[in-house]
Amino acid sequence: MTDCLSPSQLVEFQRCGEAWRRRHLEEDFVPPGIAAVTGRSVRETALACLRRRQQGETPGPEETADLAADAYRRGLARGVHLAPEELSCAPALLGKGRDNAVSLALLFRRALLPALSPLLVEEKVELDLALPLPVRVTLDCCTATGEVHAFSSASRRWNPEKAHGAPGPALWPAALDKAAGIRPARMVFNVLIAAGTPALQRVETTRHAGDLAPVLRQFRLMIASINAGIFPPAAPESWHCSPRWCGYFYSCPHIPAARKALSPAFSARSSLF
Ligand code: SF4
């Protein structure tokens, strides 16, 4: 059973309660897809570079590329989920994932790192919000002037509504207050985009005091649903309810056998790489 909640768990639950149940209650881990392994490698590298900045050092391009390639290799060693249509070109796709991880990490180093003087890096803050469980908030980076930066990777530009509707920023003020006793001056999602020439998209968002209540209501609904044993499945036509994006697809009771039979299951480890 999970011992705390988080904004990302709330998003996961809202996307598919059944997938949340498998992962967080049954602890049935399925490997992430290539894009997720790439994204995690870039984030891991960005955070490592920011920690170095805290010590007054800036990793060079070669070191940054090595950090990203190593993080990607470690990610693959933990396992990767491949969709049926990816099987025939798996080695090429895994190689492209590594190249994307390296080029996005280099973009981060070039376009973002020089402007950031981090006070906090990957700060995990547990908040008591009068819910049955505490809520753990992770602040990717906060500068001494109160800028809060989150880092993501994507294959295309974000619709800004994604940032404006995300539950995390509503909790960032309380987390930053608890961690450093300051209020956010700016809240920015930095999206590193891997399509064609790597690009950086900055999406600034704002939250007001009244924006916390709707997020707490969503957490309460999530908890009530869990306590009642109700785990709503994703909409069957949604992009993430597919063999490509969901590792539970072939064992999911909500997917008809005929749909599962359309393509065979496969899950690979880094031996393919
Ligand atoms: S297959 Fe669809 S309903 Fe089942 S766990 Fe995955 S996303 Fe949820």
Image (spheres, helix red, strand yellow):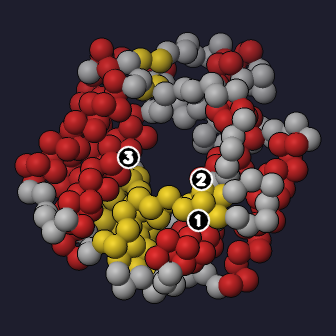
C-beta proximity under 8 Å, tags 2 and 1: yes
* Residue 144 placement: quadrant: bottom left
From mark 2 to mark 1, how far is it between C-alphas?
A: 8 Å
Q: Position of residue 26 (x, y in %)?
A: 70, 27
Counting from the top left corner in percent of width and height, residue 244 is at 53, 30
Dot 2 amino acid type: Ser
Residue 204 percent across, percent down from the top left: 46, 78
Q: Is residue 162 left or right of residue 64?
A: right
Name the front one of labels 3 and 1.
Answer: 1
Which circle marks residue 168 in the picture? 1
Camera sees residue 42: yes
Tell me if residue 258 comes above or below residue 246 in the rendering: above
Pointer 2 local density, CA inside 10 Å: few below 14, some 14–19, many at least 20: some
The residue tagged 3 is 39
Which residue is found at the position 16% from the left and 51% from the top? Answer: 64
CB at disc 2 and ligand 1 closer than 8 Å = no
Picture quarter with the N terminus: top right
Q: Is residue 100 above or below residue 266?
A: below
Q: Residue at x 82, y 50 (%)?
A: 223
Q: Is residue 233 left or right of residue 202?
A: right
